[in-house]
Image (spheres, helix red, strand yellow):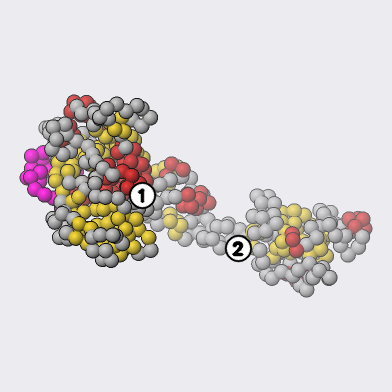
């Protein structure tokens, strides 16, 4: 990955959202593929097509508990005139060897058991007397006359068509078919299919390991007591959850105090388990913005090309941003602003696509749509900034949720969309059509 030098002109100009995003995604490459056991591959992306080695189901089998019969033997069967058939044995799922069903005979069969030779259909047990009937003669005489292996008789009260209640070999997928395409994200149904066709392992791109840390001496962990001037650390929880939602394995480090040496040491310690690092806070121009202080000059002759560049973006919220690489393996780092809404919006716009790119996906962005704005008053936006407002979307309409303040966490919790106001628009009237980024 290549990034701009720490003192490049990029820090002195206003970057557009699209320029910053392009710079991030151009620098990030998908992770190298590995072979994983099925359950370890959940959430990963296939790197090759998977073909079916054996048809599913691999043999004709019963879809019901009942009796395997010949069609001619039950033709015309009714409650008044049932067909009485000799039961020659049982066929259970997984049972080796098959009975032969001849004229006037039936085999008791369980769901999933292979259809025995000679049988053409399955009649559900509900269509029969359950084998309790005496057959054409009294029960004692029937048993005495039954050939070796016979287990009695069954009366069938309804006819059956050929292949009734039979799952045909290959009716799900056939040998040689493509089961899954490269690029598929493996969820529970896909894992089930791989197991069903006998695959114990699969070649995938692993889920990226994302390390999230927040900065600020004022931050306290939830569950602890607040002192004057302190607030709870919500950003690291929000971003860790967002990273997991995007498909990553995320590690939350928590809050680091406003000390550059402490931050550098923490980041160095975490690089070993990171494919991507995300920080929040400390990227603006304040006296205690330690992320800039700690990381802007990282990189030396032993690590050429590493370092983090801090930028101003033409967006609201989320103007201050940082991006670069750290360490000998050039682990990408995205430094986000510290206000909760700014942090979360920045994650959705830049970090989520980076995670999806590492996974090897081609569609890395949240879906967008057009919607009618429903609001009590016009939306205002500073000229030259692309504004992202929290919204609630339903049935082709979107309404703003909360105010424009970047600290309003409660409003964010009730939003499922971002309303996009372009850079050249200063006011949007109610009823106008707007672009919407869908978060749900």
Q: Is residue 289 visible?
A: yes
Instruction: Name the residue that disc number 1 marks.
Output: 414
Is residue 176 magenta-colored?
no
Q: Secondary structure at mark 2?
A: loop
Q: Residue at x 13, y 38 (%)?
A: 285
Q: Earlier in the sequence, mark 1 or mark 2?
A: 2
Residue range corresponding to the magenta coloring: 1-19
Q: Residue at x 47, y 49 (%)?
A: 188
Could you tell me residue 295's position as x and y percent?
16, 34
Closest to the observer: 101 or 256? 256
Tell me if 164 is positioned left or right of 192 in this view: right
Asked if residue 238 lies left or right of residue 421, the reply is right
Q: CA distance from mark 1 to mark 2?
A: 50 Å
Q: Determine which of the numbered discs, if any, sits on residue 150 in the image.
A: none
Residue drawn 30% across the image and 55% down it: 400
Name the residue at 38% across, 30% down.
Answer: 223
Residue 233, by quadrant, is top left
Q: Where is residue 57 shown, x and y percent of the image? A: 57, 57
Q: Position of residue 273 (x, y in %)?
A: 31, 34
Residue 256 visible, this orientation: no
Residue 330 in the image: above or below residue 75? above
- For the N terminus, the quadrant is top left
Q: Does residue 257 sit above or below 203 in this rendering?
A: above
Task: Name the residue nearer the viewer: 334 or 95.
Answer: 334
- Quarter-wise, where is residue 85 in the image? bottom right
Q: Which residue is mark 2?
A: 168
């Amino acid at each position: 990955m290549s990034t701009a030098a720490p003192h490049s002109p990029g820090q002195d100009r206003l970057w557009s959202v699209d320029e910053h995003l392009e710079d991030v995604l151009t620098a990030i490459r998908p992770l190298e593929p590995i072979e994983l056991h099925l359950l370890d591959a959940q959430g990963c992306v296939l790197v090759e097509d998977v073909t079916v080695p054996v048809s599913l189901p691999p043999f004709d089998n019963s879809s019901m508990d009942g009796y395997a019969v010949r069609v001619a033997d039950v033709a015309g069967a009714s409650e008044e005139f049932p067909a009485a058939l000799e039961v020659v044995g049982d066929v259970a799922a997984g049972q080796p060897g098959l009975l032969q069903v001849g004229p006037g005979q039936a085999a008791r069969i369980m769901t999933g058991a292979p259809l025995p030779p000679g049988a053409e259909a399955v009649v559900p047990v509900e269509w029969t007397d359950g084998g309790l009937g005496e057959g054409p003669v009294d029960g004692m005489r029937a048993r005495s006359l039954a050939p070796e292996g016979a287990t009695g008789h069954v009366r069938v009260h309804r006819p059956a068509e050929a292949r009734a209640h039979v799952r045909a070999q290959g009716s799900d997928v056939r040998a040689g078919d493509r089961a899954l395409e490269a690029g598929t994200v493996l969820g529970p149904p896909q894992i089930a299919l791989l197991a069903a066709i006998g695959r114990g392992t699969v070649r995938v791109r692993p889920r990226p390991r994302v390390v999230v840390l927040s900065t600020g001496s004022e931050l306290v962990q939830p569950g602890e007591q607040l002192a004057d001037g302190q607030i709870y650390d919500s950003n690291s929880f929000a971003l860790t959850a967002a990273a997991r939602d995007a498909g990553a394995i995320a590690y939350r480090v928590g809050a680091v105090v406003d000390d550059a040496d402490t931050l550098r040491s923490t980041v160095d310690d975490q690089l070993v388990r990171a494919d991507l690092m995300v920080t929040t806070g400390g990227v603006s121009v304040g006296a205690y913005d330690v992320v800039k202080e700690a990381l802007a000059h990282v990189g030396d002759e032993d690590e050429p090309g590493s370092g983090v560049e801090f930028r101003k973006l033409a967006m609201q919220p989320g103007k201050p941003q940082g991006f670069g690489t750290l360490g000998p393996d050039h682990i990408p780092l995205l430094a986000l602003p510290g206000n909760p809404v700014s942090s979360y919006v920045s994650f959705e716009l830049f970090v989520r696509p980076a995670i999806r790119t590492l996974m090897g996906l081609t569609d890395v962005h949240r879906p967008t749509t057009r919607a009618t704005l429903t609001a009590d008053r016009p939306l205002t936006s500073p000229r030259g900034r692309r504004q992202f407002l929290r919204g609630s979307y339903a049935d082709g309409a979107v309404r703003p949720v909360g105010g424009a303040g970047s600290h309003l966490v409660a409003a964010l919790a009730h939003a499922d969309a971002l309303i996009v106001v372009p850079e050249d628009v200063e006011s949007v009237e109610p009823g106008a059509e707007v672009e919407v980024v869908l978060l749900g």
